[in-house]
Image (cartoon, rainbow, N blue to C red):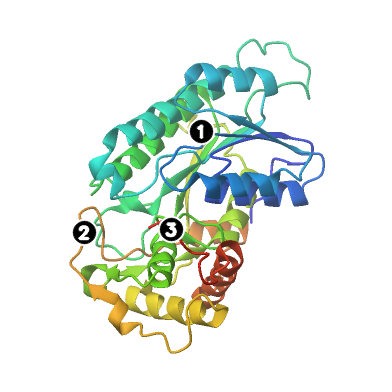
């Protein structure tokens, strides 16, 4: 069990992607539970999916006096530099990214801009946060103490070894999205080695829950079923996913934030990069057909779908799509060993909470569902 070396109380923390699913959920937990914290959130509010959902998440955060929001892109170096100069964050959590495997096939520019250029800008500003600190008194400004950033289970590509371990080779990505996330890990390692920036990368596994991303399967399936459409289940249903509930993801992130990899010297006398990687997943892959069945049951229970809904007539089994993999499965041994935590929310419990939120958010009464994102 790690003895945490960072006390979050009284810290200034920069969270990029603040209007995103994980970003907003993380900020809410930090503001509710950490005394004296100041959260600086940035997001460009792009239209990859319904902006009103991002605005809803930000509105939920407005009630916290410790949260301050600035609209802008991490790909804008001048903007990022100004944020660092103004607030001098001690902890940085980079969650801003262009997400989505299939979207990367048709819109690669967005991934290069956000996931590569944007992350480079974050690394550079973290690096220069140490400038001109010679002679500062103990306890004074020491620059960024820890950079935590989002990676993805997509980096494992078509890896045949199950469950996925951070010790596995990840040099055969099957999508541009995965390639950019792997590149982020390599960039972080280089900056940790060269400049001593403590960095921790987190490979998230299929995150779901209330107020999630509409492009994710569970959300888009709910939309289409409610509108009377037909959902497509890829690889003829022969897929497994390690679905991880949002509260478990956030709990893992908060714990990781409190332990920065330590700077030390190796046996060869050279500095060892203060760099770590962890999987955060439920470690319990679910068959996609079972997942969809539980989802429709919970949508019926919540009143989103009518009783005796003819589910069979609203689903279609289709081939695997480019960029997809048949199974994801997280080995979280390191997370449990180092932080005493492993995700454990069951799929039915998580989908029930999503279905109840969906019912409340969209109303789901006659005439109130028009315009739900496809």
- The image position of residue 140, as x and y in percent, is 77, 21
- Residue occupying the point 40% across, 75% down: 291
The answer to whether marks 3 and 1 mark residues whose Cβ atoms lie closer than 8 Å is no
Where does residue 247 sit, x and y in percent of width and height?
Answer: 60, 61
Residue ID at (43%, 47%): 49
Q: Is residue 165 left or right of residue 316?
A: right
In the rendering, at what x and y percent does residue 43 appear? 54, 35
Mark 1 surroundings: few (<14), some (14-19) or many (≥20) residues within 10 A: some
User: Is 369 left or right of 64, judged from the image as shown?
Assistant: left
| Pointer 2 or 3: first along the chain | 3
Mark 2 or 3, closer to the camera: 2
Where's the C terminus, which quadrant? bottom left
**Residue 225 placement, left or right of 5:** left
Residue 321's tag is 2
Counting every numbered tag in the picture gives 3
Q: Earlier in the sequence, mark 3 or mark 1?
A: 1
User: How dense is the environment of label 2, judged by Cα within 10 Å: few (below 14), some, or many (20 and up)?
Assistant: few
Query: Which quadrant of the figure contains the N terminus?
Result: bottom right
How far is the residue under mark 1 from the one under mark 2?
A: 29 Å
Instruction: Please give the name of the residue rendered at 66% of the width and 28% of the height, measured from the top-left corner.
Output: 89
Q: Residues within 10 Å of mark 3 (few under 14, many from 20)?
A: many
Secondary structure beneath disc 2? loop
Identify the mark at residue 44; answer none if there is no mark.
Answer: 1
Q: Is residue 269 visible?
A: no
- Which dot, 3 or 1, sits closer to the camera? 1
- State the residue position of label 3: 205
Asked where in the image residue 6 lies, by quadrant, the reply is top right
Secondary element at image label 1: loop
In the rendered image, which quarter is residue 352 located in? bottom right
**Residue at the limit of the structure toward the right, as seen here:** 35
């Amino acid at each position: 069990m790690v003895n945490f070396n960072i006390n979050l109380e009284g810290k200034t923390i920069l969270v990029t992607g603040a209007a995103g699913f994980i970003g907003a959920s993380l900020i809410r937990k930090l503001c509710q539970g950490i005394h004296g914290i100041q959260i600086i959130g940035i997001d460009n509010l792009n239209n990859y999916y319904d902006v009103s959902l991002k605005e809803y998440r930000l509105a939920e955060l407005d009630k916290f006096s410790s949260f301050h929001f600035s609209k802008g892109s991490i790909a804008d170096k001048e903007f990022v530099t100004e944020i660092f100069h103004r607030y001098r964050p001690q902890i940085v959590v980079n969650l801003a990214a262009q997400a989505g495997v299939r979207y990367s096939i048709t819109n690669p520019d967005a991934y290069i801009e956000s996931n590569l250029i944007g992350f480079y800008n974050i690394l550079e500003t973290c690096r220069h946060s140490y400038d001109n600190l010679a002679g500062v008194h103990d306890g004074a400004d020491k620059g960024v103490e820890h950079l935590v950033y989002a990676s993805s289970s997509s980096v494992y590509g078509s890896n045949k070894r199950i469950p996925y371990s951070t010790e596995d080779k990840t040099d055969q990505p099957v999508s541009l999205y995965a390639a950019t996330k792997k590149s982020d890990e390599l960039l972080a390692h280089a900056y940790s080695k060269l400049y001593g920036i403590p960095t921790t990368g987190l490979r998230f596994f299929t995150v779901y829950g209330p107020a999630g991303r509409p492009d994710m399967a569970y959300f888009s399936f709910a939309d289409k079923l409610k509108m009377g459409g037909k959902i497509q289940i890829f690889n003829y249903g022969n897929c497994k996913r390690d679905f991880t509930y949002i509260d478990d993801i956030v709990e893992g992130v908060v714990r990781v934030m409190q332990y920065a990899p330590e700077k030390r010297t190796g046996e060869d006398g050279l500095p060892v990069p203060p760099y770590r990687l962890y999987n955060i997943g439920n470690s319990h892959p679910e068959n996609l057909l079972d997942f969809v069945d539980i989802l429709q049951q919970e949508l019926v229970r919540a009143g989103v779908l009518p009783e005796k809904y003819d589910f069979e007539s609203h689903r279609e089994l289709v081939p695997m799509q480019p960029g997809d993999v048949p199974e994801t499965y997280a080995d979280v041994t390191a997370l449990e060993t180092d932080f005493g935590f492993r995700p454990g929310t069951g799929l039915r419990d998580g989908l029930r909470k999503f279905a109840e939120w969906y019912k409340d958010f969209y109303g789901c009464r006659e005439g109130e569902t028009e315009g739900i994102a496809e």
